Amino acid sequence: MTGGTTPNAIRGAGPSGVSIEAADLTRRFGSFVAVDRVSFQVGAGEVFGFLGANGAGKTTAIRMLTGLLAPSGGRARVAGHDVYTESEAIKRSIGYMSQRFSLYEDLTVWENVRLYGGIYDLPSREIRARADQMLSRLGLEHARSQQVRALPLGWRQKLALSVALLHRPRIVFLDEPTSGVDPVTRRQFWELIYETAAAGTTVLVSTHYMDEAEYCDRISIMVAGRIGALGTPKELKERFAVPSIDELFVRLARPSSNGAPPQTPPRSLAGPPASRSALSQRDPERDRGTKDEKS
Ligand SMILES: Nc1ncnc2c1ncn2[C@@H]1O[C@H](COP(=O)(O)OP(=O)(O)O)[C@@H](O)[C@H]1O
Ligand SMILES: [Mg+2]
């Protein structure tokens, strides 16, 4: 866990300093087990990468953690609230950017902000103030009256993240926010993630781009519903003696290693974010050595 005991870090946590905890969390669809006894904890202010190929079970796990889908078994607490009995309290404590685009494309930028601000019960004055702040930070003031569908995908994703943070949640769940986004915009999006975490919000972010692992404090790699590996990128590379997380993923996905069916190898991200200063400041020890350069 990073973030330690700074006041910001504590903001995202339940009483234990842990933002998200899952123990043997399981979801079945009929006889098919989509999420299979998954256990992990995410500390306050941490950027936790939820890696896995398509179909690995990431979205299903996130839907259970956000209180949208009832688990079939196991336990989980988010911001100190139980997923079985306190899903309403969870929804108030979190932001969620779903895998499918979560803003209304036929509404303008401002109309989306006003709509979500209303859903989060923010007073109108507060919504206006936060919208001004957010649009100026994103450099999107000019787009206030534009329909969201007119914006490039990268901008829509940045806007969607900002809207998911409008009510200043302690924890934000981002489900493949960079999927389909060009590499340059993807780097900018990660900068926004770092800023979010630096402000004390816990970030759980799923991705099938293995290179994005390097941008996370810790990662889990899901393979066929199970967590195949969990730790910091550096720890995992050392433990499994692999040069990259991409390599580790391929190894975990091999049927001989864990009995799971082979999966499509993930695509890689071309390079690191333009500036990693925000993250470097938070964790100077983090490994910056290895980058996958596959296309
Ligand atoms: N509502 C559902 N009914 C049946 N199967 C589902 C349902 N939702 C997801 N699945 C299956 O569960 C597996 C995991 O899906 P998902 O959690 O979406 O994976 P990921 O987000 O990692 O791509 C997939 O095989 C998917 O087809
Ligand atoms: Mg998914």
Image (cartoon, rainbow, N blue to C red):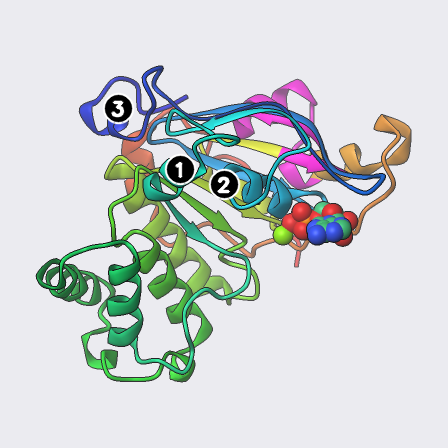
Q: Is residue 231 one of those drawn in magenta?
A: yes
What residue is at 20 percent from the left and 61 percent from the top? 134
The percent coordinates of residue 139 (x first, y second) are: 22, 69
What residue is at 19 percent from the left and 24 percent from the top? 7
The percent coordinates of residue 265 (x first, y second) are: 76, 50
User: What range of the chain is rendered magenta?
Assistant: 221-246
Work out whether residue 229 can be spotted: yes
Q: Earlier in the sequence, mark 3 or mark 2?
A: 3
- Disc 3, SS: helix
Residue identifier under label 2: 67
- Disc 1, SS: helix
Residues at circles 1 and 2 in contact by the CB criterion of under 8 Å: yes
Q: Earlier in the sequence, mark 1 or mark 3?
A: 3
Residue identifier under label 1: 90
Work out whether residue 292 can be spotted: no
What residue is at 85 percent from the left and 27 percent from the top? 257
Above or below, 191 against 253 in this view is: below
Tell me if mark 2 has few (under 14), some (14-19) or many (20+) residues whose alpha carbon lies within 10 angstroms of its own: many
The kind of residue on which mark 3 rests is: Ile
Q: Earlier in the sequence, mark 1 or mark 2?
A: 2
The kind of residue on which mark 1 rests is: Ile
The picture quadrant where one finds residue 236 is top right
Q: Which mark is residue 80?
A: none
CA gap, disc 1 to disc 3?
Answer: 17 Å
Quadrant in which the N terminus appears: top left
What residue is at 35 percent from the left and 54 percent from the top? 164
The picture quadrant where one finds residue 86 is top left
